[in-house]
Image: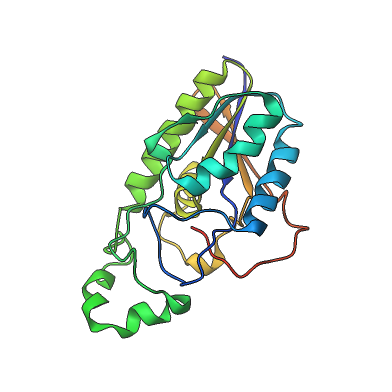
Amino acid sequence: MPRATVHLLRHGEVHNPAGVLYGRLPGFRLSELGERQAQAAADWLAQHDIGHLVSSPLERAQQTAAPLAAAIGLAIAVDERLIEAENFLQGRPVAGGKGLFKDPSNWRYFRNPLRPSWGEPYAEIATRVLAAARSARDAAAGRDAVCVSHQLPIVCARRSAEGQRLFHDPRHRQCSLASVTSLTFDEDDIVDVEYSEPAAALPSGTGAGA
């Protein structure tokens, strides 16, 4: 099998005026900036030979995939393994994260940050996303593939591919909105990881996005 590249595309900025941790909740769409970010990513990825496009089932990821699908003439497949990480705190206001720590009812979720205790284990996230990436690679049949997902799933997959510990400081994640983390496969091994920010030139917004 020749070398193949799978691009993990993070969705664009989400319209989230209430500032909640939305996780897997329905109804969270891209903001206007997020739509422009998705178009910038599509313009960048359309320069590659894309043979398969697959997305998380969540609306913001589907919206991010749409401009690329239109540009290259591919349907958007859906893979549940690309979904946002499960988080037991979803739906609560985050206030930059500090508000979650001030509420005593949340404290039980912070007992083990290594796993983590507030949601889906990092190891399980990495395993499912890398499995989805390999399935996308196979479906692309020698061409590149694009998987549209979310920040934490992409970060866990990358850290696993690079042999890094999965526990990390989220403030130091390299996975901006509408960024692309590209995994190059040689047979079943990941031999290279590259990172790009096609939407970096766009002005930053006030929304959030996981």
The image's colouring method is: rainbow
Question: Height in image: 102 above or below 206?
Answer: below
Question: Is residue 56 visible to us here?
Answer: yes
Q: Position of residue 15 (x, y in %)?
A: 54, 62
In the foreground, 14 or 50: 14
Left or right? Give the position of 126 relative to 148: left
Q: Residue at x 44, y 45 (%)?
A: 58
Question: Height in image: 155 above or below 51?
Answer: below
Question: Is residue 162 visible to us here?
Answer: no
Q: Position of residue 29 (x, y in %)?
A: 51, 53
User: Looking at the rendering, which quadrant does residue 130 occupy?
Assistant: top left
Left or right? Give the position of 105 relative to 127: left
Q: Position of residue 105 (x, y in %)?
A: 21, 78
In the foreground, 169 or 24: 24
Q: Residue at x 45, y 62 (%)?
A: 168
Left or right? Give the position of 134 relative to 4: left
Q: Residue at x 24, y 71 (%)?
A: 111
- The quadrant the N terminus occupies is top right
In the foreground, 208 or 162: 208
Q: Position of residue 39 (x, y in %)?
A: 70, 44
Left or right? Give the position of 136 relative to 51: left
Q: Residue at x 27, y 62 (%)?
A: 88
Q: How many marks?
A: 0
User: Looking at the rendering, which quadrant does residue 90 occupy?
Assistant: bottom left
